[in-house]
Image (spheres, rainbow, N blue to C red):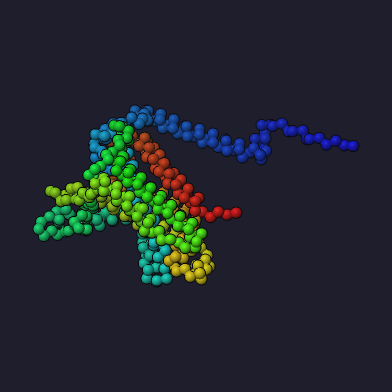
């Protein structure tokens, strides 16, 4: 009779970190990480020592000093006596405005152009091809400058609106003025305003939150929730009875009526721009630099998005279109209900890269005088303070944070629409 016993456990030896395949990859990674951190530490220490020898010890105290310059296009209250940190904050908001507007516009244009390029109409298809090839093969900086030049040269000056027989006329019932200094549109105002909430006191990062806007967003959000609940209720009725009740008028009323009542209570009215002296006063002013940058970035990025959309649609098997057509669906509904929902799973990942590129390309705004983050922190602040390293590091960190935020949001959306495989 024999007795089976467990083999003796082998004790751990340091040589296993190199010769044992179970530990070798981990050892290499730890050594590489230590080497990278040492190199990074040496670079920082060497840079700090060299700057100290030049009498420029690394410091961010300059952010609390008065900026001494003005910013023409801004969303927040700002004057030249505010700090460099405040100027950078205003510039950052200008960057975000262009990025958000550009991503929205480029998406709509890109999807429409990508679909139209697959049209059976030969003229439309070729026109879309010419658009794509023209825009994506010319540097975006040239498009920005070209758009700005067109707006300055072709739009009338404010003085053209003067006189009994003016050379230029305001549009849309004398409410919108398009000039070579920018576009003036009516400004939303409230007679019975709820006021603002001042956040962060007198700090450089201070900003005001409009209670009127907050109330509108709450009411609109509640209205949309109610309309969605009514739609789901109609779906359940259709599942049980087979008949779907008409809901569009109730859903429209749920959205429009509460919002209209709130606007009436707040005394909503429009403040129209008026020509006073040498320029228009009142209303909301969009400078040419903002419009030129927005249009150029949108049109340029839309060319790339169009190709992504076209590739995504072509990736869907043609048999699905034929099957949908055999069921009696029209081409428009086939595209909206069958092709695009599946193509989104292919389109979204490369679309994220184009959103990031549009945001980073907005740093070219200084070419047309738009004061974004590059124009404030990396432009005038850098020149005034001489803090090259600090301003560059700060700008790099901000752009990195913006890009990672966009990527995170789009990845969450991509995970919600991607195909789930068993």
- In the rendered view, tell whether residue 67 sits above or below residue 312: above
For image coordinates 28% across by 56% down, the residue present is: 146
Q: Residue at x 69, y 31 (%)?
A: 13
Left or right of 6 in this view: 413: left
Residue farthest to the left, as pictured: 164
Image vertical order of residue 155 relative to residue 206, above or below: below
Q: Residue at x 50, y 67 (%)?
A: 324
Q: Say how many tags the image has.
A: 0
From the viewer's perspective, tell me whether residue 166 is left or right of residue 131.
Answer: left
Whether residue 385 is visible to the viewer of this picture, yes or no, is no
Q: Going by the picture, which residue comes out furthest to the front?
A: 241
Residue found at x 26% / y 54% = 148
Which of 313/412 is in front? 412
Q: Which x, y percent locates residue 58?
A: 37, 30
Q: Position of residue 409 (x, y in %)?
A: 44, 47
Residue 351 visible: yes
Quadrant where the N terminus is found in the figure: top right
Nearest to the observer: residue 243 or residue 378 = 243
Q: Position of residue 260 (x, y in %)?
A: 29, 51
Quadrant showing the C terminus: bottom right
Image: 411 above or below 26 = below
User: With 35 as the anchor, is 283 left or right in this view?
Assistant: left
């Amino acid at each position: 009779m024999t007795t089976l016993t467990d083999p003796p456990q082998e004790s751990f030896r340091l040589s296993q970190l190199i010769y044992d395949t179970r530990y070798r990859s981990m050892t290499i990674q730890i050594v590489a990480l230590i080497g990278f951190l040492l190199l990074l530490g040496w670079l920082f220490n060497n840079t700090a020592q060299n700057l100290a020898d030049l009498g420029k010890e690394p410091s961010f105290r300059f952010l609390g000093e008065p900026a001494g310059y003005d910013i023409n296009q801004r969303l927040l209250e700002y004057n030249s006596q505010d700090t460099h940190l405040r100027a950078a904050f205003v510039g950052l908001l200008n960057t975000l405005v262009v990025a958000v507007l550009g991503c929205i516009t480029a998406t709509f244009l890109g999807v429409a152009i990508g679909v139209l390029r697959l049209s059976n109409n030969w003229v439309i298809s070729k026109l879309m091809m010419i658009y794509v090839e023209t825009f994506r093969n010319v540097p975006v900086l040239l498009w920005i400058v070209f758009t700005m030049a067109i707006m300055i040269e072709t739009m009338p000056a404010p003085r053209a609106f003067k006189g009994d027989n003016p050379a230029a006329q305001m549009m849309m019932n004398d409410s919108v003025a398009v000039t070579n200094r920018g576009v003036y549109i009516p400004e939303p105002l409230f007679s019975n305003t709820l006021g603002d909430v001042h956040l962060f006191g007198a700090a450089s990062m201070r900003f005001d939150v409009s209670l009127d806007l907050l109330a509108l967003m709450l009411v609109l959000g509640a209205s949309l929730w109610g309309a969605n609940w009514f739609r789901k209720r109609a779906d359940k009725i259709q599942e049980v009875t087979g008949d779907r009740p008409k809901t569009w008028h109730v859903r429209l009323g749920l959205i429009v009526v509460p919002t209209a009542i709130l606007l009436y209570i707040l005394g909503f009215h429009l403040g129209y721009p008026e020509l006073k002296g040498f320029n228009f006063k009142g209303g909301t002013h969009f400078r040419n630099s903002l419009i030129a940058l927005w249009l150029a970035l949108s049109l340029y990025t839309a060319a790339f998005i169009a190709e992504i959309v076209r590739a995504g649609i072509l990736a869907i098997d043609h048999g699905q279109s034929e099957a949908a057509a055999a069921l009696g669906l029209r081409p428009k509904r086939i595209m909206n209900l069958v092709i695009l929902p599946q193509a989104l799973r292919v389109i979204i990942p490369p679309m994220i890269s184009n959103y990031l590129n549009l945001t980073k390309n907005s740093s070219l705004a200084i070419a047309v005088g738009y004061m974004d983050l590059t124009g404030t922190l990396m432009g005038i602040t850098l020149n005034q303070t001489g803090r090259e390293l600090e301003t560059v590091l700060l700008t790099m960190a901000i752009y990195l944070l913006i890009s990672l935020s966009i990527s995170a949001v789009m990845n969450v959306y991509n995970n919600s629409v991607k195909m789930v495989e068993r």
